[in-house]
Amino acid sequence: MASSQPYYRGVYAYPWDVVQEGVLQFRNLVSGQGLSAVTLALSYHMGKFLSPRRKQGPVYFPGDGAVYFTPYRLTLRENQALCAS
């Protein structure tokens, strides 16, 4: 039986990937590959990351224990409205 729900196809990405490509270009790149979602890694421990498309070289060393967003508190109603838009 065929499902009426579309397939979930996603990719993991790092903040510097989006910044390098530009938000609109990154969105076009992702959707052009037939993907429907992006999981953005915004908080993690120290690492060495390979990024072949990176213009400054294929290896990136982020700061130790980096968090790449400023958290803020939303009420449940605000969060639902944000997700619906």
Image (spheres, rainbow, N blue to C red):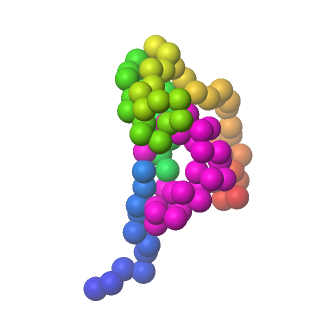
Furthest residue in direction top, as rendered:
64
Relative horizontal placement of residue 57, taking residue 80 as reference (left or right): left
82 in magenta: no
Residue 12 image point, x, y percent: 43, 45
Residue 29 image point, x, y percent: 54, 57
Q: Residue at x 42, y 80 (%)?
A: 4
- Give whichever of 55, 23 is nearer the camera: 55
- Can you tell which quarter of the image residue 48 is in? top left
Magenta stretch, residue numbers: 12-37
Q: Residue at x 45, y 25 (%)?
A: 60
- Can you tell which quarter of the image residue 68 is in? top right
Number of numbered discs on residues: 0
Determine if residue 3 is in view.
yes
Furthest residue in direction bottom, as rendered:
1
Which quadrant would the N terminus be assigned to in this image?
A: bottom left
Q: Residue at x 40, y 18 (%)?
A: 46
Up-down: is 56 above or below 11?
Answer: above
Dominant secondary structure of the residues highlighted in magenta in the image = helix
Residue 39 image point, x, y percent: 47, 45
Determine if residue 65 is in view.
no
Residue 34 image point, x, y percent: 46, 66
- Give whichever of 17, 2 is nearer the camera: 17
